[in-house]
Amino acid sequence: MTELAVTDTKADAPKVPTLPDAQTVTAVKHWTDTLFSFRVTRPASLRFRSGEFVMIGLMGDPDPKTGKQKPLLRAYSIASPSWDEELEFYSIKVQDGPLTSRLQHIQPGDQVILRPKPVGTLVHDALLPGKRCWFFATGTGIAPFASLIRDPETYELYDRIILTHTCREVKDLEYGRQLVDSLRSDEMMRELLGDGLDKLVYYPTTTREQSPKMGRVTDLLRSGELFRDLGIDDFGPEHDRAMVCGSMGLNVEIKEILESHGLREGANSEPLEYVVEKAFVG
Ligand SMILES: Cc1cc2nc3c(=O)[nH]c(=O)nc-3n(C[C@H](O)[C@H](O)[C@H](O)COP(=O)(O)OP(=O)(O)OC[C@H]3O[C@@H](n4cnc5c(N)ncnc54)[C@H](O)[C@@H]3O)c2cc1C
């Protein structure tokens, strides 16, 4: 990790940290007591593919011995599409989390560190052409799909996009629900979503709080309920492609299910039928 450069023009002058790769926060929205989203300025040189992630963070506390500060960085999916002038992120608030215990307090005008090296497997290039693309998300795992469902290329590549989002409580679904609503009412996006706006199917489920569709997406897949709900009886490697972003446990389970239907895991270097990324480590 690089050490922070500290500007120190005079020996007795206050040390003003110069944030490396600093970007300015332009907007913050708190969705629940554990979830928030924010937007930052985009470095002019930053190019990324919708679905990728970058390292972002804040300066860590000064080392008690040396007084030096180091950046405290974490992986974050870019939730905005590649054409957007700004960058959007959707974040958890972990109360004792080294980064998010502080990041949750950012305000417009504050600076965050953003390392402009986007990477990731949840990109169209990592999948072979297909007809339907499934985005399976839990919790903040919806972030890369918030990027992809706003990218016109997604609708050019597939006849149908199915976004499933599973959270414990109804309020945890709100970021995704509002995003899908905003796309359906956006004039430019409406053209891409087709006459019945049915090119993008949104399938939210909850595991704890009562809602119209309850259950873990893995159970709904195994029982076939998800396919019956959507009128799909031919799920398989010929037409279906999938991207998965959730906890380690969810990813492992969905992988098993997809493989049992004949889909194989792809990568940037070898596009196949599905790709997976962890929504967090732990
Ligand atoms: C490829 C990748 C992409 C990621 N994208 C995002 C993103 O878009 N938004 C986001 O909020 N986080 C994302 N994360 C997680 C993120 O890197 C941090 O872990 C998170 O910001 C918490 O940081 P922290 O320092 O506060 O706590 P950490 O020390 O990093 O985490 C503490 C504990 O909190 C839990 N935790 C961490 N992140 C999450 C989460 N997102 N959802 C539920 N539980 C969590 C885990 O149990 C973890 O052990 C991503 C992680 C990876 C590997």
Image (cartoon, grey):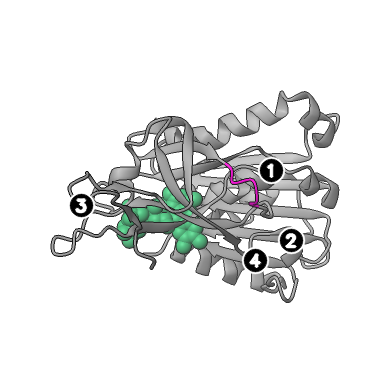
Q: What type is the residue that disc 4 sits on?
A: Val
Q: Of the residues under marks 2 and 3, which one precedes in the sequence? A: 3
Image: magenta residue range: 42-46
Question: Helix, strand or loop at disc 4?
Answer: strand
Q: Nearer the viewer, residue 239 or 37?
A: 37
Question: Helix, strand or loop at disc 1?
Answer: loop
Q: What type is the residue that disc 1 sits on?
A: Ile
The crowd level at tag 2 (other Cα within 10 Å; few <14, some 14-19, many 20+) is many
Spatial CA distance of label 4 from label 2 is 9 Å
Query: Mark 4 — residue?
Result: 275
Most common secondary structure along the magenta stretch: loop
Question: Helix, strand or loop at disc 2?
Answer: strand
Q: Is residue 274 left or right of residue 129?
A: left
Q: Nearer the viewer, residue 223 or 187?
A: 187
Query: Mark 2 — residue?
Result: 241
What residue do we see at 64% from left, 66% from top? Answer: 275
Q: Is residue 188 left or right of residue 227?
A: right
Spatial CA distance of label 2 from label 3 is 60 Å
* Rendered image: mark on residue 149: 1
Asked whether residue 279 appears in the rendered view, the answer is: no
Q: Of the residues under marks 4 and 2, which one precedes in the sequence? A: 2
What residue do we see at 73% from left, 25% from top? Answer: 186
Q: Nearer the viewer, residue 220 or 97?
A: 97
Query: Mark 3 — residue?
Result: 11
Mark 3 within 8 Å of ligand 1, using the beta carbon: no
Mark 4 within 8 Å of ligand 1, using the beta carbon: no
**Disc 2 vs disc 1: which is toward the camera?**
1
**Disc 2 vs disc 3: which is toward the camera?**
3
